[in-house]
Image (cartoon, coloured by chain):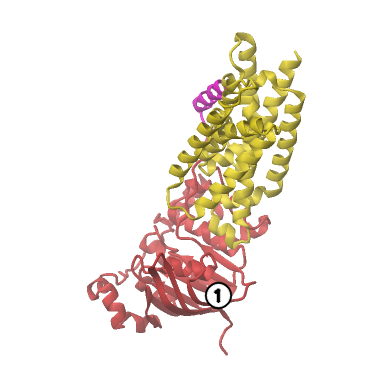
Amino acid sequence: MLDALLVQLNDISFHVQNRSILDSVSLSVRAGEIVTLIGPNGAGKTTLVKIVLGLLSPSSGSLVRNSKLRLGYMPQKFHLDPNLPLSVTRFLKLTQKADAAIEASLREVGILHLAKSAITSISGGELQRVLLARALLRKPQLLVLDEPVQGVDVAGQSELYQLISHVKDHYHCGVLMVSHDLHLVMSATDTVVCLNQHVCCQGHPDTVSSDPAYLSLFGKKGVDSMATYTHHHDHQHDLSGHVVDQQKERAGR
Amino acid sequence: MDILLYALLAGIGVALVAGPLGSFVVWRRMAYFSDTLAHSALLGVALGLVLSLPIPLMVVILCATLAVLLLLLQINQTLSADTLLGILAHTSLALGLFIVSFIKDIRIDLMAYLFGDLLSVTAQDLAWIYGGGLCILMTLILFWDSLLAVTVHEELARIEGVPVERIKLTLMLMLALVVAVAMKIVGVLLISALLIIPAATVRRHSNSPETMAIAASLCGMVAVIFGLSMSYHWDSPAGPSVVVACFVLFIGSQLIPVKTPQ
C-alpha cells in the first residue's frame, strides 16, 4: 500500500506581471518520501516551494493539501539583524516553549553545545542545523527544505543529507527539498523533479541523471564535473569543516 | 516644583514604553518609518487646531492612518520604501506647517511642537501619556512572542500560524500612539531619538531581546532625569536636553567593555 499523500500540485502556473515563473507544474509528496527539486537559478524552485507552503497563491492550477498538515520549513534566506540579541534556545522558543523538546531537537541535529550561543555568532552550517531543529520542533508531517546545504562544504553536505534522511525515518514525514546538485542528494532521494519553469523530467535519480532533458539543462560536461569525489576518511569533519576533535574543543571553550 | 514633578513623570512614562518599541524600531530597521510618523504628527496638530478637536486624539488618528497607508503601499510597492517614506514624511510636515500658518486667532508656539515643551506638561497630558503607555505595555506583553517571531523571520512566523499582517499593523499602531504621547516631551523632530538611542545604547550589553527592551526603558528614564536636571540647572530647553543626555549615555556605553561570554 502506498503511503499517505501529503501534498499534490496539479497544473500549477505562476506569473508576475505577465512574466511566467512556473508553467503547469504537477508533483506530489507522500509520507516517508524525499522529493528533490533541482534546476538552474531562476527555474522557479523557491516559488514552487512557497506555493506548497501556502506563502504564495498560484495564478492557476490546484493545490491539494490537508489544512491541518503540520509543516516544517527551512528557508533559503535567513538574515537576522545583528542588533537583535538572540540565543539559539531563545530562537527555538519562538516555536516551542518546552525546554525538554528544545534540548531533544538540538541533540537530534547534533548541536546541543550551541544552545546558548548567539545566532549571529554561529557558522553557516550550524545555522542550517538550527533552522532544521526549529522545523523539527513542530513534529512535521511535511518538511520543506530550501537549499538545506547552502554554505556547507562537501563533507558537511553529505553529513547533512544523512541527517535529513534520518529525520525522515524518525518522523516518517515527507520531505520536499530544493537542491542545485543531483549527485550529492542522489542516495537520499526517492524522486527527483528537474524544474526549469516547467517540469523537464522527473523520476528516480538514476533515470533522471541520464535523461536528455536533464543533460541539456545542465550540460554533459557540467554533469561529469559535478560527480562526487569519493575518498577514504581517516577523520571526521563537522558541518563547518572542522575536524571533530577541534569541535569538542570549541564546545568546551 | 510641581512643574518639574510633572515633567519628570511625563518623561519617565514615555521612556518606559519607548524602550521596547524603540528596540523593535532598531531590530526591524524602521528608524525612517518612525521619523515619518513623527513628522506627520504636526499635521495632526494642525488639523486638531483647525477642527477644534483634542490634539493628542487627532495626532493618534493621523499617525494611525498614515501607518495603515504605508502598510498598504508597501504591499503593492512600485517606489522603494525609503523614497515613499521620504515623500510622506516631508509632505506631512510641510502640510502641517502650511495649515498652521492659516490659523490666525490661535497663537501657537510652533517650537513647542517641533522640539517639545516638557515643562508645560499638564495633568491631562499625564493622563494621555499613562493611559496610552498602559495600552502599549499591555499590547506588548500580550503579543511579545508574535512580535518577536515576525521580526526574526516573517515566513517562518506565518507558517507557524502567526497572523503576520495583523501583528505588523499592531506594531505600527503602537508606534503611532507613542509618537502622539511623546510629542509633548521631545517634539516631533526628536521623537525618533528617544526611540532609537536608548535601544542602541544597551544593545552591546544585552544577551536577549527581553533584557534589551527593559534595559532600553531604564536607559531612557535615566536620560530623562539627567536631561531634566541639565534643563533645570542651565535653563536649557528640556526636550533637546533629554536627547543630549541619551547621546551622552550612548557614548558612555560604547566605552564600557562588553563581558565576553564564558
Q: Position of residue B128 (x, y in %)?
A: 73, 32
Query: Residue A88, position in %: x, y?
Result: 56, 51
Residue farthest along the bottom direction in this orientation: A1
Q: Quadrant of residue B165?
A: bottom right
Is residue B250 rendered magenta in the image?
A: yes
Horizontal placement of B184 versus A177: left or right?
A: right
Q: Most prominent secondary structure in the magenta stretch? A: helix
Between residues B231 and A2, which one lies in front from this camera angle?
Answer: B231
Instruction: Name the tint of chain B in the rendering.
Output: yellow
**As drawn, is A115 to the left or to the right of A97?**
left
Tint applied to chain A in the drawing = red
Question: What type is the residue that disc 1 sits on?
Answer: Asp
Check disc 1 and report its element: helix, strand or loop.
helix
Q: Which residues are magenta?
A: B243-262
Q: Is residue A241 above or below residue B193?
A: below
Tell me the residue that label 1 is attached to.
A169
Chain label for disc 1: A
The answer to which image quadrant residue B48 occupies is top right
Residue nearer the viewer, A127 or B85: B85
Q: Is residue B251 above or below residue B172?
A: above
Viewer can see residue B215: no
Q: Is residue B73 above or below residue B39?
A: below
The reply to whether the magenta stretch includes residue B55 is no
Mark 1 Cα shell of 10 Å, populated few (<14), some (14-19), many (≥20): some
Q: Please provide percent x and percent y for residue B251.
A: 50, 24
